[in-house]
């Protein structure tokens, strides 16, 4: 039995990002299809697929469990880096408060707010990136594609805000 075409395609990164954030089930469906599309790039697996010998029965459940595990790890990494950064930034704010540099009696300084917000975003992204993530043999699993995108989404605006805050009164 021959299958001349594949119903599987690599995922659009932005669509995957949106689904990751908003619709876990749809994200997992996309991750399963993406994973198979990556597998079918290998000539031997493509040949076996075309001959009806690949994938094995039950592969979708196994792929979904794997994608779920990797997505959960990605979410845990994002959350734990956020919490750690928030706590460390809280220490920084407490030190600034003890030194009289910030307080309820002072007017809000847009430069300080921009700088602190940007520093938070950049630190969060960096801490998360340094935490690493599970890598697959191909290096093309959907969580591996999203990881650098999440980093850029937090880090680059963070640097821009921090720079604007530092230059606010120049």
Image (cartoon, helix red, strand yellow):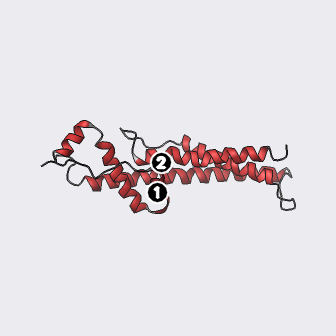
- Find residue 122 and name its label: none
For disc 2, the neighbor class at 10 Å (few under 14, some 14 to 19, many from 20) is some
Badge 1 density bin: few <14, some 14–19, many ≥20, Cα 10 Å:
many
Residue matched to label 2: 146
Q: Nearer the viewer, residue 86 or 109?
A: 109
Q: Secondary structure at mark 1?
A: helix
**x 33%, y 52%: residue:** 33
Residue under the point 35% across and 49% down: 34
Q: Please count the marks in the image.
A: 2
**In front here: 94 or 41?**
41
Q: Residue 54's spot in the image, x, y percent?
A: 20, 46
Nearer-the-camera pick, 98 or 55:
55
Judged from the image, the secondary structure of the residue bearing numbered disc 2 is: helix
Q: Position of residue 117 (x, y in %)?
A: 70, 52
Q: Is residue 41 above or below residue 117?
A: above
Identify the residue position indicated by label 1 in the image: 20
> Which part of the image, by quadrant, shows the C terminus?
top right
Q: Is residue 140 left or right of residue 3?
A: right
Mark 1 in CB contact with mark 2 (< 8 angstroms): yes
Q: Position of residue 129 (x, y in %)?
A: 55, 42
Write the residue at 60% across / 49% down.
154
Q: CA distance from mark 1 to mark 2?
A: 9 Å
**Where does residue 111 sit, x and y in percent of width and height?**
80, 50
Query: In the current view of this chain or complex, which residue is farthest to the front?
Result: 4
Residue lying at 40% horizontally and 50% vertically, measured from the top left = 11
- Mark found first going from the N terminus, 1 or 2: 1
């Amino acid at each position: 039995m021959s299958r001349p075409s594949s119903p599987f395609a690599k995922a659009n990164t932005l669509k995957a990002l949106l689904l990751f954030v908003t619709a876990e089930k749809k994200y997992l469906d996309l991750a399963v299809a993406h994973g198979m599309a990556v597998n079918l790039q290998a000539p031997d697996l493509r040949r076996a697929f075309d001959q009806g010998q690949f994938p094995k029965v039950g592969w979708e459940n196994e792929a979904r469990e794997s994608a779920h595990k990797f997505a959960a790890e990605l979410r845990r990494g994002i959350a734990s880096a956020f919490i750690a950064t928030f706590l460390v930034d809280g220490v920084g704010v407490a030190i600034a408060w003890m030194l009289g540099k910030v307080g309820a009696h002072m007017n809000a300084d847009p430069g300080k707010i921009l700088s602190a917000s940007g520093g938070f975003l950049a630190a969060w992204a960096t801490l998360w990136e340094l935490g690493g993530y599970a890598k697959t043999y191909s290096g093309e699993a959907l969580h591996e594609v999203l990881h650098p995108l999440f980093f850029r989404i937090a880090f680059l605006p963070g640097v821009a805000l921090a720079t604007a805050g530092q230059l606010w009164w120049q």
